[in-house]
Amino acid sequence: MHGVTIERTSPRIRLRLTTSSDWSDIELQGFLVRAVTVIEPEGLPDDWFVTSEQIHVVQPAAAAQGDTEIQLTIDVSLDRRALSEGFLTRVQKGYIGASTLRIFALTDETASLIDELTIEGPVDGAVSAMLSPEALQEAFPLLVER
């Protein structure tokens, strides 16, 4: 029998943080993160870092008060369990400016927006963005067990 073999891999998402705040943090569910690759650090000073559990960017307060935007894009390979459990991110920022987190599904090299969260002005605590299992299954139909 001839057919096409589809390689089942883990879901990959792209996180793009754009901020005019003096600092922004994104907390990731580290136990569901298999790998993180920095794609595009745009305009970032030296005080930024990325781990499997956290993304942190910072810029001088004077730059933030002048509405300077900085951007960081990373690709994240998720454990397949995310397809049944979902994937939670929590975003925090300083009191200046705004932060936007865009989450894309990566299939081949195509990025499709699946969620967007914008935080403006002073906010106490973190704001959560939950990618539901249904949203991930819809974004990655070839990875869903039938």
Image: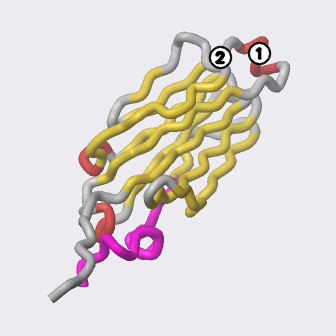
What's the distance in space between the residues labelled 1 and 2, CA to CA?
Answer: 7 Å
Eyeballing the image, is 126 above or below 134? above
Eyeballing the image, is 21 above or below 106? above
Instruction: Name the amino acid, label 1.
Output: Ala
Instruction: Name the amino acid, label 2.
Output: Gln
Element type where label 1 sits in the image: helix
Q: Dot 1 corresponds to which residue? A: 63
- Tell whether 48 sits left or right of 142: right
Q: Residue at x 64, y 31 (%)?
A: 71
Q: Quadrant of residue 3?
A: bottom left
Q: Quadrant of residue 63?
A: top right
Split into 4 quadrants, where in the image is the C terminus?
bottom left
In the rendered structure, are the residues bearing label 1 and label 2 in contact, judged by CB atoms less than 8 Å apart?
Answer: yes
In the rendered structure, which segment of residues is drawn in magenta?
Answer: 129-146
Split into 4 quadrants, where in the image is the N terminus?
bottom left
Residue 19 painted magenta: no
